[in-house]
Image (cartoon, grey):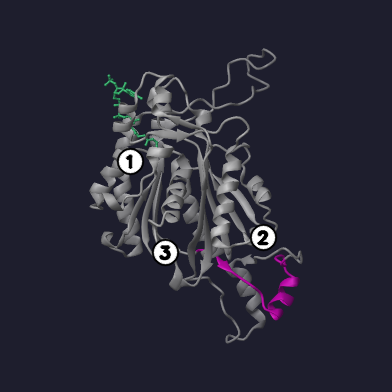
Amino acid sequence: MANASCMFTPTLPQFNKLKSSAIVPSPHPIFKRVVSCPSAVEDAADNLSPSEFKPNRLVGKGCKLIGCGSAVPKFEVSNDDLSKIVDTNDEWISVRTGIRKRRLITGKERMTGLAVEAAQKALEMAQVDPDDVDLLLLCTSTPDDLFGSAPQIQAALGCKGNPLAFDITAACSGFVLGLVSASCYIRGGGFKNALVVGADALSRYVDWTDRGTCILFGDAAGAVLVQACESEEDGLFGFDLHSDGEGYRHLHTGIKENEALGTNGSVIGFPPKGGSYSFIQMNGKEVFRFACRVVPQSIQTALENAGMPGSSIDWLLLHQANQRILDAVATRLEIPADRVISNLANYGNTSAASIPLALDEAVRSGKVKPGQTIATSGFGAGLTWGSAIIRWN
Ligand code: UT7
């Protein structure tokens, strides 16, 4: 993997030189990372003999997955429950999707509450203190705050070590994109402990009168702690990421168009009306075809990037959208059914949470063991999709 940036931690002579330049490291006691550009390194190196100068590039630094956690709401809705509100039945849903029940947030439950619980469990398993987290990526399409919810999670966890926390929006591909992003921050940015949280509450944007979509989704959160390590321990071997905005029409939850008149009746539509989002709109058949086409290709490419054969994979862990998609991808990749991780029967499609939720269950049940290799892939709205070949712990 390419590392375009570099980390620069100045020695004393370098620091003295830097003090008079524009990139003086902050004297603030909680400033931990010093990331600079090659020209600054060259500038600081002016006073050094060639033997003293080391470029400090983080080539070959690894990152490993050492903790996971998950959380789901208490309220459970079965297929039979859904058959009371839309024209459907348990047999149709089970046969066409594999889903039997799902959990939904109710009352005062919030997506961030689930995310915090999942992150706490991941930190506990990893035995990492919240103060030592320096990056928190919240992968979600349903933040509790339009401006992003990651900093709220940082505060609730009590991370006081000056972490960077922000949201990543990439629907059901969010977690894989977050995982790869965390690895890039670790390899190229000098970060040490990255919490990658996938959490979504799509139930808020489901049209509960539309049987084509309301049967699919559930709410949940999952988290993984990714830690910097030596290259020999590296746990992210290869990846492959994509997006295709042309496919947006097949799956979206767009902003509602403002009506023609502004609030004061003005025809030019000023001042604007408050914004809100429509329900999830999906062409299920097209999304199904898209997933079955791109996911096997993407995993193959990630394997090639990792320099690994398909036979080296212990587990296939896909975004939990539909059991028929999981089966089709496994068949295409010639991965036996008993190596496919699936828990969608109990939770449905939980968007960005589905991969870390399924990983957490598989790790805690002893199914996935330390040292095993997992091919993981997320796909969904955007359209976006991406795969990563990872090693657990
Ligand atoms: O996170 C990624 C996002 N989404 C996905 O991955 C979804 C991918 N797509 C799918 O999982 C499947 O396309 C669905 C499960 C959404 C639908 O399954 P399908 O086999 O593609 O069914 P369909 O839409 O072709 O519908 C077949 C029939 C239709 O009736 P007619 O026209 O044949 O009479 C539908 O009206 O089934 C009907 N139908 C239902 N019947 C009972 C659609 N939804 C339901 C339902 N219960 N819930």
Q: From what the image shows, is residue 109 above or below residue 341?
A: above
Residue 391, how many percent across, how many down? 41, 62
**Magenta stretch holds residue 9:** yes
Residue 305, how many percent across, how many down? 35, 61
Could you say whether the residue bearing mark 1 is in a helix, strand or loop?
A: helix
- Tell me, for residue 291, which label it has, or none: 1
Q: Which circle's residue, 1 or 3, is located before the other in the chain?
A: 1
Residue 223 seen in render: no
Camera-near label (2 vs 3) is 3
Packing grade of label 2 (10 A; few <14, some 14-19, many >=20) is some
- State yes or no: discs 1 and 2 in contact (Cβ < 8 Å): no
Packing grade of label 3 (10 A; few <14, some 14-19, many >=20) is few
Does any atom of ligand 1 lie closer than 8 Å to the CB of label 1?
A: yes
Image quarter where the N terminus lies is bottom left
Q: Is residue 124 left or right of residue 386?
A: right
Q: CA distance from mark 2 to mark 3?
A: 26 Å
Could you say whether the residue bearing mark 2 is in a helix, strand or loop?
A: helix
- State yes or no: discs 1 and 3 in contact (Cβ < 8 Å): no
Q: CA distance from mark 1 to mark 3?
A: 29 Å
The magenta region covers 4-25
- Tell me, for residue 370, which label it has, or none: 3
**Magenta stretch holds residue 120:** no
- The residue shown at (51%, 69%) is 229
Residue 282 appears in which quarter of the rendering? top left
Camera-near label (1 vs 2) is 2
- Tell me, for residue 131, which label it has, or none: 2
- The residue shown at (33%, 51%) is 298
